[in-house]
Amino acid sequence: MPNPPKSGQVNPVSRRQFFRNGARVAAMTGLGALTGVLATRGTAAGWVWQIDPAKCLRCGNCATHCVLEQSAVKCVQAYAQCGYCQLCTGFFAPEPNELTTAAENQLCPTSAIQRTFVEDPYYQYSIDENLCIGCGKCVEGCLRFGNGSFFLQIRHDRCLHCNECAIARVCPGEAFRRVPAQSPYLLKSVAK
Amino acid sequence: MRRISKFGWLGGLLLLLLGGVARAQLLFPPPEFESGYRMPVTTTPPGRALWLQYLDVGVLAACLAVAVWLIYRPRSRRGIFWLSLFSLAYFGFYRKGCICPIGSPQNIAYGLLHPSYSVPVTVVAFFALPLIVALFFGRAFCAGVCPQGALQDFFLIKPIKVPAFLEHGLGLIPYLFLGAGIAYAATGTGFVICRYDPFVPIFRLSGSFFLLAAGVSFLLIGMFVGRPYCRFLCPYGALLKLGSLVSRWRVRVTPETCTQCRLCEHSCPFGALREPAPPGAPAPIPGERRTLGWLLVLLPVLIIAGALAGRALSPVAARLHPTVALAELYARQQQHPVVYGVMTPEALALARMAEQPGTVLEAAADLRGRFRLATAIFGAWFGLVVGIKLILLSLRVSRTDFEPDPGACFACARCFSSCPSERVRRGLPVVTVQPPVPAAASALAK
Amino acid sequence: MKPEFKLLDRREFVNFVSRSAALLGLAKVGSESATAATTSAEQTSTNAFAYDVSRLQKTDPKLIAYEEVTRWRSPRTSVRQIAIGPGDQVHVCAGHYISVFNPQGQPAAEVALTGPADSLAVASDGTIYAGLRDHVEVFDAKGQRQAVWAAPDRKSWLTGLAVGKQDVFAADSGKRVIWHFDLAGKLLGRVGEKNASQNAPGFIVPSPFLQVAIHADGLLRVNNIGRHQVEAYTFAGEFEGAWGRITTAIDGFCGCCNPIGFALLPDGRFVTAEKGLPRVKIYNHVGEFESVVAGAESFPENARACNGLNDCAHGGLDVGVDGQGRIYILDLVTSEVRVMKPRA
Ligand code: SF4
Ligand code: SF4
Ligand code: SF4
Ligand code: SF4
């Protein structure tokens, strides 16, 4: 493996060799010190990106700026916070013709919200994550007129965990932050 | 370290629980359903399992070991080729390029300056392992483990020689990029190295048009200029280059004696092979010494000039930080109001800032201060790099054999089979004609 | 100068110069394209998914029948409700306090509470009734605590209070019921639960804004917010009728749950307050729309009623009326009180 030094070139080669060895030892020491410093900081298993729903401004970038074709950001429902309203302002357009699930009455551009009758006068609203594009339109509707139970979250089964989230840097609310991978969601309310 | 992290964990959990309780108390109760309806729970699908991340580190270590072995023991181009294809599949198309060693210096810099971000073990490993290997064996990572390198290598068809001045000039860009990446990470702006990685969008088969186009252009250029990203842009490559320069063992065309037959001269597609020093009378030493002396004087001048130039550029550089950008947008808005559309990001950001303009302006001023320091250091760093480059260029060549420049050599093993001594050593038929230009595909046909 | 350069060999010098020139050029191109990119991004920024209600936020000026007399900001935040007592003293519950102002907005007194109050009523003798989440506390006009009533239910969330000559009614958003007490706090009955024999449809309360008032006609009025109606009940709980219609149009109530607050003018007409499109309007005694006191454009901050809060129980407006028919609007976001009088 090592290359035998050529005869007759002993002097310069060994001087260079000495430099190289010194530099290598220094570099290894530096690397060791660096890892040491990082280790004392309490090295967590990892971080993932998440949206703080209290800071999200529903700007629409989440739908368009994820590196994935279909954004990893989806709307989620905090059921415990939902009013189960018959006129859900997250589901219906601001002035619906009638309170039916016909697409023209719906707010969601992809009809990703499922409305199911629970009991008079209550309806449950859930998100079909295969359809939702994370545009935040329903989130704004629900916040403005309703209880604010819809909110956007990065779904970690879809997210690629980019070292730098491509949406984070264009988020006007600076709502993205790294959260510990053990508790990767910033949920709006906890179920009872 | 274990204890600290465990306690941090507990504290986090406690906070979470407390927060949860406080919130639950605040929460207005949902209706009381009579039909026995049970409220669903918001699902929280977990991210990638931790053991899988450790597996990534394991695969990285194993690949590095195999690469080192392939380069030094069987000295097999074929083996390196297959290993790099595996790495391309695993780290590239399966892991989609994140996290990779190329971006890791940013995590390290960010972690050092932001105590709230503890750098994950896996990231430290991705940062350190290829570097340690480089310090002992050269750029084995580039040879067979880096998916970005493998992708470019795969497209290499007909390498042309890059003129020396371009090679050396463009070769400074990686240091520039590395410095910028670290400066932007240290100021908490973001990870620009990841942002402008041209190949990760190809691994993901999605991404911005600009980056996909950049990736494709790099591959097209890479058909003729071997590994253009690795040589002229890759910031981690700059670190590996520094490491390899002082590596314990070096890649050689042949472990046997070089007969100076010049058959290997054009076998390196990356222009890494260096001629031995011309035989005969060396240049007069005093002249050389004087050049060196002047360059040594020039070095601090370059560093100071770089620092000043960097500092002068800091207002522009700071603009990449979202908070500074918002503060500037706000200031422009005060002078020439522009009406932004309903719920556009700008309108919303401005409205957010209007609630507390003072805090944002203060934060921006603080950041600008940090940028002045960061860009000055960045400029000084670049001055240092240029100065050292000039000094190295003026040093006398001490090579007696054709051998790869340890910094520039990717350890791809292409040159090995062009050496007749090597072929004899390995019992291969000795070709007298220069073998066709080595490309990824022709690697198998040796 | 000259000899120094000779020390560098010519080729190196040329290389160095050309390198620096190339780098400088590159840097220039880079910075130019960066500025070009940022400025163009600025101009082309759109939000294809905007939830646009700007059209609904404009009110026809012809409909506006009131003008502002004065306004002041409550020194304490987290304001929740407003009630006007004898002598037109303005009572505002704000967090752990009840602040009392004179009609010009000068602070007159302050009552400290043991917890945050969500509802408030002032009797004609100046006695203050405050609803603290699940129970009522009573204070005399000087702010001395007189009584603490037992919580009617574990889930109670009192969001509205009304005091009559012998009765106190408490609107409970948590239990979706109106509790009927006597002045001593003895529970007399429950009003408004779903009950076919009394024709009561039941309250739908998606958010904690159920309120109650005693009308001069002797009936109770309750804002059934989930049905977007104001309903009338006898003290015994018999449903007597309702008015109100769901629409974002100016004559109806918008959103999922409105009106979130209301008050009665001396002549029996209604003042209503809405959230979502924050607006205050007047309806006549049978519920026909009459005029606008203040439209959504008057409360720009209120549009972000929910921002940063875990549930949206803290946005919107509340209204009160004094003896001269002036209307007091409490902005729950900015903690401002605005006093409105009919336009001359
Ligand atoms: S980019 Fe930010 S503000 Fe915009 S929708 Fe996403 S989280 Fe909300
Ligand atoms: S508007 Fe919001 S709170 Fe109301 S039903 Fe829809 S999702 Fe639930
Ligand atoms: S409106 Fe947008 S965010 Fe809401 S469910 Fe539909 S696609 Fe998802
Ligand atoms: S981290 Fe990457 S994949 Fe995940 S949301 Fe951000 S841009 Fe999308």
Image: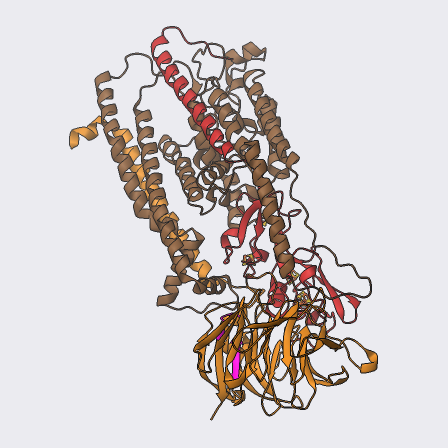
Chain colours: A red, B brown, C orange
In percent of width and height, residue B29 lies at: 69, 64
In percent of width and height, residue A31 lies at: 46, 27
**Which residues are the magenta region?**
C327-336
Q: Which of the 4 image quadrants contains residue B70?
A: top right
In percent of width and height, residue B214 lies at: 50, 45
Tell me: residue A6, above or below residue C102.
above
Q: Is residue B247 left or right of residue C256?
A: left
Q: Quadrant of ligand 3?
A: bottom right
Total marks in image? 0
Tell me: residue C271, above or below residue A98.
below
Q: Is residue B445 left or right of residue B243?
A: right
Q: Main secondary structure of the magenta part?
A: strand
Between residue C115 and residue A162, name the one nearer to us: C115
Q: Is residue B346 left or right of residue C251?
A: left
Q: Residue at the spot x=49%, y=64% of the render?
A: B348
Check if residue C328 falls in the magenta segment. yes
